[in-house]
Amino acid sequence: MVLLIAGGSGGHVFPAIAFAQRLVDMSYPVYFLTDQRGARFIQEYSYLFEHVEVIPNVASAWRGMAYVKLFVAAIEMYLSLRKTRKFFQQYSVQAIFSFGGFMTVMPMIWARLWRTYGKKRVKFFALHQSDRVLGRANRFLSRWIPVVFTGYPDTLGFLKKVHPIVVGTPVRKTFFQIPPMKLPETTLGILILGGSQGASFWSSLILNALAQLSLQHRSRLHVFHQCPEQELSIVKKNYGELSIVCEVRPFFSSLPEVLAQVHVVFSRCGASTAAELACCGRSGFFVPYPHAKDHHQSHNAEFWVSQNAGWSCHQRMLKEEKITLFLQECLEDPKRLLYTGAHAMRLGRKDAAVAMINYWKGCV
């Protein structure tokens, strides 16, 4: 039995789901350990797992909370430890793959202790780091977990004793089925993504930029816009006033179907999102999340730009005029999107999950 651990954002959970798909294809029984935040992403994929265990979220214990909240975090950590201990007593685990998020720390520590002192010993442990900067949970765990897979060839923040194994980021199979991008003859498809945690700043910025385009250019656009639910009605109204064909939703449940219709994507630069775009050869205009302590999305975006596989701009420097000019250039010279998309596709690693499985099989 293989145990996958991931929690928090979709950037941690979706690579784990992609990895689970490959394991199931190879007839491995898969169990999943996550928190309340991570659980919402796996409902559609519950058929992959023999069992899903949801443990309390212990993220607050890592963020310098006030004493009262720290007390609550201590209770959450105790409940997490208790539930994790019960899980390892109940199930016999051959291998554990952890994909990041604060909630992974307690289960991985307990698993290491269980390997040393328990009767049902785990034979293989591994971490996967999707972002270009080693996350705090993975950095902490890498002191005791010898195998660390990475999504980027130059991941930053490793301890000297750690020797990362570059495999790429696992991507769900539906993204491999998206047809190659074709040169837009008349209509340019645009997708605006907020990420799994949403990003409301896009709404006014994009709409103001589109308003500066000529009516002829606006008539050639088909926009798919993900925005917070409370903004849906006003965003739809604004697109209507601009005479732009659009689909506005709080979440696109079938993202591959949407990507098949678009030529450029405006989004944050989480590692999972960037890897998905690369595997289907779509160009990304990345605006990294500005409040991350380690600025991992900025480092992610720098990599794609350096490889001519996308564009990027810091949020504080992004003006409406820049987006307007970018869209004008795309409408007048769409070949640049094909060029950038082709570079992105060359960097996509469709074999990431298989490479991880083969490494594990070679170690046991």
Image (spheres, helix red, strand yellow):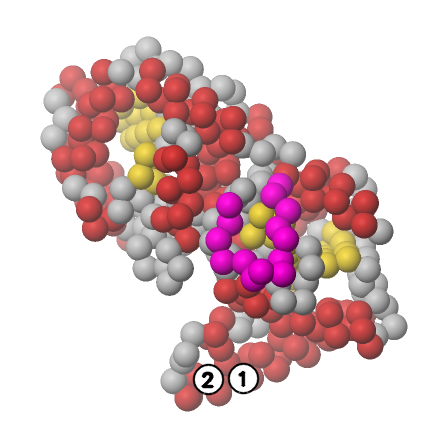
**Main secondary structure along the magenta-highlighted residues:** loop
Badge 2 amino acid: Leu
The quadrant in which residue 249 appears is top left
Label 2: which secondary element: helix
- Residue 122, how many percent across, how many down? 80, 63
Q: Is residue 114 left or right of residue 337?
A: right
Q: What is the tally of numbered marks visible in this picture?
A: 2
Do the residues bearing badges 1 and 2 touch, measured as CB atoms within 8 Å?
yes
| Picture disc at residue 70 | 2
Q: Which label sits on residue 74? A: 1
Residue lying at 32% horizontally and 59% vertically, measured from the top left: 291
| Residue drawn at 42 percent across, 15 percent down | 182
What residue occupies the far top of the structure in this picture? 185
The answer to which quarter of the image holds residue 174 is: top right
Residue 47 among magenta residues? no
Q: With 326 as the anchor, is 271 left or right in this view?
A: right
Residue range (magenta):
154-167
Depth check: give the residue in front, 335 or 192: 335
